[in-house]
Amino acid sequence: MSNEPLLNNLLLRQDTWRGRNRSLRRHVIATGNENLDRLLLGGWPVSALTELVTQQDGIGELSLLLPTVKHYASENKLCVWLDPPYQPYAPSLVNEGVPLDKLLIVRSKNSKEWLWAAEQSIRGKALLFAWANRAQPRYSALRKLQLAATESLAPVFLFSPPNALKAHSPALLRLELESLEPNILSVTLHKLRGKMPGAKTQITLGERTTERILLDKLPVNIQYPKMPQTDFPLVQKDDIQHLNT
Amino acid sequence: MKEPLANIQKQTHQIDHDIWLYIHLPQLAIEAVAANLITPLKDGPVAVASVQRNAQRINCCNLNAKAWGVEPLLSLSTALAICPDLTVLAKNTHQEQQLLQQLALIAYRFSPNVIIDTDGLWLDLSGCAQLFNGYSNLLKKLYTQLSAQSIIAVSGVGKSPLAAKLLCGHEFHHYLPSKLEIQHALLATTLNKLPSTAKQQQNFKQLGLATIGDLLTLPRSALSQRFNSDLMNTLQLLQGEKPSLLRHFKPANEFHDKIQNPQGLYNKESLLFPMKTLLQRLCQYLMARQCYSRKIVWQFEPLLGNQQSMSITLSGNNHGWSSLLSLSRLKLERLELPRSIEQISLFCDQFMVMPGLSFDLFGDQITLQENTSELIDNLNARLGVEALSRPTINAEHLPELAGNIASIEKLIGSEQQLGQAQKPLWLLPEPAPVRLHNRQLYWRKPLTIVSGPERLCGNWWQSEQQRDYYLACDSKGARYWLFRESTSKQWFVHGLFA
């Protein structure tokens, strides 16, 4: 058969659909969360584009990926953050155990540079987190990233705004992240080969005791007694008592 | 029986310790000028002329020109009359010195003792055999590398620098002659090659001395009576009894090289060829010094106007000229150049020591690090240094000072472990004011305080700030890091728990 090498090449690619044979999809890396691993049939797909649609910033979208960052950092790989929406806060990254010298923040000036930097990072075998802050990248641009990712040895993560869900995406995995209450992230599957879209799971991010303070006891919600103005901006005694409770 | 054996051993011992190779470059003058030309020379008769004895005379000519009858010291007009197609170049002593320095860099990779002569190089080969698995291998490699520079070289081998130069033949050695062969050749060398005055040569003739062998058979005491001390000195140098006082070559502390093109270069594509040549020279220099460059600087000088410079920061491990060239090319695309470029120079004065290369069990070189630095260099070259940064940590209390963003060139430490209180992953570039309306905080959405406070104070000598940090969340489950300024009682949001 003269077509055999051609077929083999096609079958080696991650984005070739092979029916319901799940056992063939084995290039995954564990997410560090059992529920999520079950939802994603093993973990984040390696050598593929993963699109994370976050309904809102600050719901724990980054904490979800920290185990993956730590894993690749321990393999001496660089993690490139392309156009993050805010400034990554170093002390908390250190507290989480992420080595800072393995992080690289890249700021692009236009969408052309964004695409170039993303492609370079993927081809440079780095772990890429890209934020589409400008306009949502075109299908062809994402397709380019997906193709580059097939040669990479790491997953590629793209963070998109909620309106991106209306458009098609060449990403291998598409997830929607939202949160109904603090510390609990609800993940909805929108696209994954071998699984029906619409599957959901809930993830608890950290078992931190969030002690709920009665609103009455907080300085915001109480009327301050009018105090005479002092020369020094001292903390009021009443305040301290409230703070200690 | 014992004594002759000991004698032989002593002799072999000696040969292992004193082997000098002299590389003579008969066409150095032509090669030096040709190396700095942007358009390569044609395959015709070529000669270099300079002013000698009050006239323009041929200094050096190639084989093609010799076939026409052109020879050194012929006046230029005669030479042109004999051979009208002769390409005549002006002698450039500076370029010759430059070429010799470059070749010395190559030679330096074969021997730790290299001496530069006016038109050749000396290499002390003693003790270099083992590294190259035998002298013939060493000579073969050396010859290949010299030929790669399109250099015509002939060699001589002797037990002292002077002897090696006297024994220089018409071709390059492919194997090392035995000690006996060297000695025979030296003794058979005619005396007119020996550096001496005309009067001494006259004396040699009167004494009936034709070869060095004749001279050496005479007792030294008789010779020293007849000739002055200079000749005795020369003889001692020749025999290797006295160490040579020539200055040994050391690679320069920084790299600086340039290529000129008087016609001017008009587009960026044509700049790449001379840039490639310069980078190849840089790589030879780096290899000889066993280090990597941290930064290279290009300078483009136009015929008129100001020069333009372009610096490329390297993170290391990028020692191949091809990768340096592609980086320079990326950077060049962003550069606005003057219309025509006359001179291109390359500087490099920041180096780092080449780390020992490690190999894994199966002999594959470990190249993980290489990828990362190559990626950083690529991004750096195209997007500029300002586009790349890295989070850093400082021993400060106020969050905006404790966690910062610094350029990637700065080395960072991440040893510090901070308090146990929850810290957000995202920090806003500037604290954003929160609206307080009817005992309810609003930032994008209504906020509810979940836990806190944690008091953080700034340094009193810098800013008198006291902040109480709270963790808040909104109805959609997003968590924020709020603080209340003690003095102004104003609420701000400072971070997001992503």
Image (cartoon, rainbow, N blue to C red):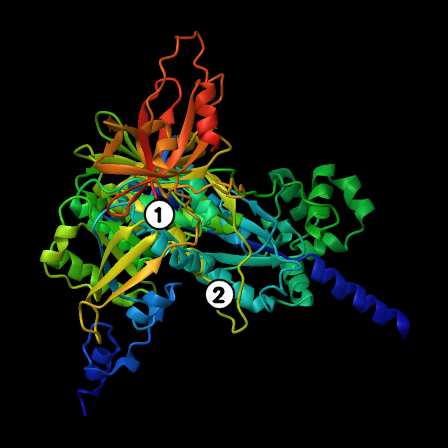
Q: For the image shown, how many numbered marks are present on the structure?
A: 2
The chain holding disc 2 is B
Q: Residue at x 76, y 56 (%)?
A: B217
The answer, for residue B87, to whether it is visible in the render is no
Query: Quick one: SS at disc 1?
Result: helix
Q: Nearer the viewer, residue B34 or B61?
A: B34
Instruction: Answer with left or right where residue B392 lies relative to residue B429.
Output: right
Looking at the rendered structure, which numbered label has been put on residue B377? 1
Q: Nearer the viewer, residue B411 or B319?
A: B411
The chain holding disc 1 is B
Going by the numbered disc 1, the residue's amino acid type is Asp
Residue B103 x, y percent position in the rendering: 47, 49
Residue A89 x, y percent position in the rendering: 39, 40
Q: Residue at x 41, y 58 (%)?
A: A67
State whether residue A49 is above or below residue B46: below
Q: Nearer the viewer, residue B257 or B27?
A: B257
The answer, for residue B446, to whether it is visible in the render is yes
Instruction: Answer with left or right where residue B245 lies relative to residue B241.
Output: left
Q: Residue at x 29, y 77 (%)?
A: A25
**How far is mark 2 from mark 1, CA to CA?**
21 Å
Looking at the rendered structure, which numbered label has been put on residue B365? 2
- Residue A126 location, quadrant: bottom left
